[in-house]
Amino acid sequence: FKLRERMELSKGGRLLLQGKGGEELDTLETEGQMLQRVMPELMGMKNILAINDEAHHCYREKPGAAPDEDDLKGDDRKEAEQNNEAARLWISGLEAVNRKLGLARVFDLSATPFFLHGSGYAEGTLFPWTLSDFSLMDAIECGIVKLPRVPVADNIPGAEMPMFRNLWEHIRAKMPKKGRGKAEGLNPLDLPMQLQTAFQALYGHYEKTFELWVQKKVSVSPCFIVVCNNTSTSKLVYDYIAGFQQAQKDGASQLVEGRLPLFRNHDEHGNPLGRPRTLLIDSEQLESGEGLDDQFRTLAAEEIERFRREIVERSGDAQAGQNLT
């Protein structure tokens, strides 16, 4: 729903077209142009029904409230600011739809229907428009949410409580800061030992499940998902799991095998698999609605090129692969 520039102008070009003392150029999309780009199939319709998934990210901040991001520091503060910006963008987009097309109803769906930190409301305050607050235990028993697993023990000695239960607090100081460039030059094999041990423990359970599914002739494999706090961490974790090329002193590179065998992206001879087992996904890039930025293109160059080839093979259209931006 973010309004885009209708034409790309450099700062100098904008000043030149504007002229000395001239009115500032308005090159932003109108609301109607934005909606035509975002939802062309709905244009011309009236009384739209909107279903907001993950609706705890869609709200308007409390009017006149002092920002409470001041209580946060570092990445936590940036995350609160990003949450607020995303919430403003989402609710503003719905308001634009209502002005141009009309909204008959809006249904919010969320497992956590309450205000986030930075909204101006006390964190955890239930949305006043909540109609049904379904019990988490009921949702687990019905199988409509993921089953949480709480560590009750681990094999790291010296702690009263299992370290895996609150792993982040034990490793956060040893992890790279936010920003893709911050991971450059770091060795994935130097990830904190507590994190490596946790991966091995989780992988051991996955391996048993994988074998069980094979025996039962399940046609797909179970999915193993790792969620990281930033793209620097995700790149190191991805390389640790799937394998990576390590630069040598003579300028050559050598393949370092992934530490979780079922998730390696190379065969036993070091050749890339035709279909990778492990993917690196940047949710911010996917949700931005914009083209891939240069840093992400560099990090995921191999995956992007493989995906480009697959598009051409499936569609037979060479141009379709080139259109991937």
Image: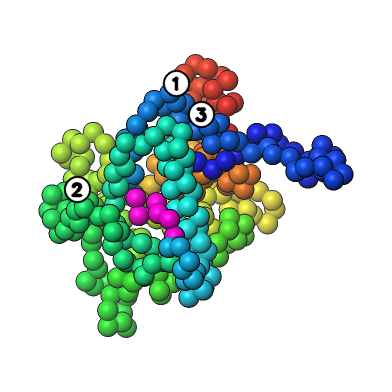
Which quadrant of the view contains residue 13? top right
Kind of residue sitting beneath label 3: Gln
Residues 154 and 296: in front is 296
Which one is in front in this view, the residue at disc 2 or the one at disc 3? 3
Q: Which residue is mark 2?
A: 144
In what quadrant of the picture does the C terminus appear?
A: top right
Q: Earlier in the sequence, mark 2 or mark 3?
A: 3
> Disc 2 on helix, strand or loop?
loop
Residue occupying the point 58% across, 20% down = 319
Q: Which residue is mark 1?
A: 314
Which quadrant of the view contains residue 214? top left
Locate residue 125 relative to residue 188 in the image: left or right. left
Q: Earlier in the sequence, mark 2 or mark 1?
A: 2
Q: Which residue is mark 3?
A: 36
Residue occupying the point 43% across, 55% down = 60
Mark 2 Cα within 10 Å, few/some/many (few <14, many 20+)? few
Is residue 85 within the magenta segment? no
Residue farthest along the right direction in this orientation: 20
- Report the Cα–Cα distance between label 2 and label 3: 35 Å
Tell me where residue 270 appears, x and y as whole percent.
Answer: 49, 42
Kind of residue sitting beneath label 1: Arg
Which one is in front in this view, the residue at disc 1 or the one at disc 3? 3
Is residue 56 within the magenta segment? yes
Tell me where residue 267 appears, x and y as whole percent.
Answer: 43, 40
Which one is in front in this view, the residue at disc 2 or the one at disc 1? 2
Tell me where residue 74 appears, x and y as whole percent.
Answer: 53, 70
Residues 30 and 76: in front is 30
For the record, the magenta segment spans 55-61
